[in-house]
Amino acid sequence: MSLAPAVLVTDGEQRAALAIVRSLGRAGYRPYVGSARGRSLAGASRYVEGEAAFPDPLADPEGFAEAVQQQVSRWGIEILLPVTDAALLAILSRPERFDGIRIPFPDLERFRRISDKSLLLRTAPEVGISIPEQRVLADVPARAALGDQTLHFPLVIKPARSVTETATGGGRTKLAVQHAVDRRQLEALLDQLPADAYPILLQRRIVGPGVGIFLLVWEGRTVAAFAHRRIREKPPSGGVSVYRESIAADPGLVAKSKALLDRFAWSGVAMIEYKVDEASGTPYLMEINGRFWGSLQLAIDAGVDFPLLLADLARGGRPEPVTVYRVGVRSRWWWGDVDHLLARIRRSDAELALPPGSPGRLRALLDFLILWRPGDHNEILRWDDPMPLVRETIEWLHRR
């Protein structure tokens, strides 16, 4: 009797990695995990066959790729699923190391192109997608021209790439989106960014709910579609969602999102992130993540199992499209939500760069204290697989 297919999931510290492991493990695959310490969130799952420590793909992409290659051979891996941008860049940059291994992502050039926010936002209007008003700082000298320009605050400071690829010594750097409420703060934040962070986008802040369109495209056809809205984020001004809800996917926005992916000849999973302006109702494109996303478990709970569909496609299957799912399903990342609440209590609205009309501290506390509503799911806690929450809790308390 042949063994079930073995799958290696990188970046076991990520919640998406845990969602992948649980999905594939329950479906009969044999998941293995790689992580920085060899003792990760996903590695605590009962479905994991084995775990290994890998070098940091940001600091040492070559060492990371070599370690992954060794474990692929040791474990007899058939499918390799990198989870973060850094892991994807390290692996896609070295395809010769993984000849014969199924990696269901596009090649390096397409991944780089769709990860380039500057290129993405130039392309989006061609398919009818709105983008925020913005100025592009091509390089450090371009900052000098800002002194002569009128800027409307608050501004979002967004490096064109979330992960730089030209850092000294072959390493890479992860860059975060930041907010500036005035010119002084803008200058201070720009001073902290390395030259490798450019080009930098200075965008008008869109005030309104965050909406994600999630697609799995394969050989030009849409295999899966899903949508959610963000309820709470960490940091509160905008970042990782900690509480979110499945919503009906707007057919027009799905069609435009698919058209945009087609412009990049995309194949695989993708999260197309929008902000819906509360005044006009217009969805504005923020970015595309050409990989699995942090809130992946919500899609699975609602009935769209992206990891299983992608793994089956990688093995030559042709699953039926999944575009119908349960609306009103909510997913709460407990410790992320605690961090959200602590930030709201400890820091002022101005310090957090919250938009006008944001719920006050008391409202934030009362919302947090509603521990369960019909349709709620705890993202990490699963009664048949409790150890990931135990490990996450210990690590959260240790950090505190």
Image (tube, helix red, strand yellow):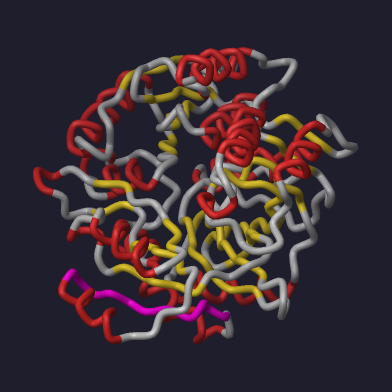
In this view, the residue in front, 140 or 392, is: 140
Residue 83 makes an appearance in the image: yes
Where are the magenta residues, as a range? 130-140
Query: Which residue occupies the foreground of this view, 112 or 211?
Result: 211
Residue plotted at (61% across, 28% down):
335
Name the residue: 50% across, 69% down.
Answer: 261
View extreme (right): residue: 374
Instruction: Indicate left or right for 337 with 350 as reference.
Output: right
Does the magenta portion include 66?
no
Q: Quadrant of residue 197?
A: bottom left
Residue 281 vs residue 338, the one in the foreground: 338
Between 281 and 14, the residue placed more toward the observer is 281
* Image position of 27 with respect to 391: above or below: below
In this rendering, position of residue 116 left or right of residue 172 = right
Where residue 129 appears, x then y in whole percent? 57, 80
As displayed, is residue 285 above or below residue 270?
Answer: below
Classify the position of the N terminus by image quarter: top right
User: Which residue: 22% across, 39% down?
Assistant: 61
Where is residue 339? Give x, y as percent. 58, 33
For the image, the number of numbered tags is 0
- The image quadrant of residue 247 is bottom right
User: Compared to 264, does 313 lie above or below?
Assistant: above
